[in-house]
Image (cartoon, rainbow, N blue to C red):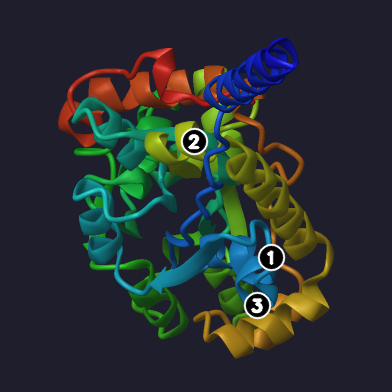
Amino acid sequence: MKRKILLFVSIAIISIMAIGCQKETTPTKKPIEPIEPKTVKFYYQDGTPALTVAKLAKENPDIDKNITIDYQMQKSPDLLVSEILKEGADIAIVPSNLAAQAFNKDLSYKVIGTATWGSMYLTSTEDIKSFQDLKGKEIYTFGKGLTPDLVLRYILSKNGVEPDSDVKITYLNSAAEMGPAFLSGKTNLAVLPEPLLSVVTTKKEDAKIIFDLNEEWSNASGAEKGFPQSSLIIKTDLIEEDKEFVEKFIKEYEASRKWAIENPSELGEYVEELEISVAKEIVKKGIRWTNPENFNIKDSIPEYETYYKAILDFEPKFIGGKVPSEELYFEK
């Protein structure tokens, strides 16, 4: 009887020890922590860059359930520059030289693609056939020391016209001032960006394009696509932390850009609702888009390098003193 009792006790002890071992060796499952929602700030300038964003801003597609995009259109270029230099924007469309400047200041942005290619045109009511015909004339433009100035001066000099002696260049404060100056007859020879050009040619029938500056830049520099006027940039931290979201966003932006180019009538309606300062009627008629099919940065790095090298020769501080390395560019 005693043996039976001892055997029973032994079995019980062994069972308890086995259960204890199982409890000790069984890993405990950590509770899944919920992903905290966050807001991504997307800054872009009023005008043509805003047109490429119109579909996104209006429809606000759900790209990631945990990420909200705050679309902020900037009326003032200075405000946009300020947000980039203090790294306030997570995503932005900026003048391409500002992207280089930010990179050379060690700010954490990468160029994703070209939002808009050169869309500036030397326009006149005069019958001008060649660059030599410009000698002795006064040309109105805007953005002294910035891209419009650089591009005009570069093209003139490459075509045998000395910007500081053969012509007189008169600068206005902004592109918005160019239209009234041309329409009033204050000047009949001016650099007009799109979509302002479409407004002017609609109202002044004898206005005509003398030179497409993007095309002339290509001829003078050898850059096949011309110059990248504005670029989509994204903060490096966002790329590294939320790569899946970034890749989905890039696809949505490309679709928005393509839609804007191919659907002028619908775009006109969105323009009015979003208060983009481009006349709805002008947008509906269609504006000139340069290189509409070229967005991917992988195919355009030579154009950027040519653009930055030209700026370096003209005004180094405009890009932060040096041509950026290829680390500036993001490739999917």
- Labels 2 and 1: the sequence-earlier one: 1
Q: In the image, is 236 to the left or to the right of 116? A: left
Q: In the image, is 147 to the left or to the right of 195? A: left
Q: Residue at x 45, y 19 (%)?
A: 306
- Identify which amino acid the numbered label 1 is placed on: Asp
Q: Can you give x and y, in whole percent of width and height, for residue 140 in the image? A: 33, 61
Residue closer to the observer: 299 or 160 = 299
- Identify which amino acid the numbered label 3 is placed on: Lys
Q: Distance between the Cα atoms at labels 2 and 1?
A: 18 Å
Q: Secondary structure at mark 3?
A: helix
Which quarter of the figure is the N terminus placed in?
A: top right
Residue behind mark 1: 62
Q: Looking at the image, do the residues carrying marks 3 and 2 touch, with CB atoms under 8 Å apart?
A: no
Q: Looking at the image, do the residues carrying marks 2 and 1 touch, with CB atoms under 8 Å apart?
A: no
Instruction: Give the numbered dot on residue 58.
Output: 3
Q: In the image, is 40 to the left or to the right of 13? A: left
Vertical position of residue 279 compared to residue 145: above or below: below
- Identify which amino acid the numbered label 2 is placed on: Ile
Residue behind mark 2: 239
Which quarter of the figure is the C terminus placed in?
A: top right
Circle 3 residues within 10 Å: few <14, some 14–19, many ≥20: few
Q: Distance between the Cα atoms at labels 3 and 2?
A: 24 Å
Q: Can you give x and y, in whole percent of width and height, for residue 152 in the image? A: 38, 42
Q: Is residue 46 visible?
A: no
Vertical position of residue 177 compared to residue 307: above or below: below
Q: Secondary structure at mark 2?
A: helix
Q: Residue at x 31, y 18 (%)?
A: 323
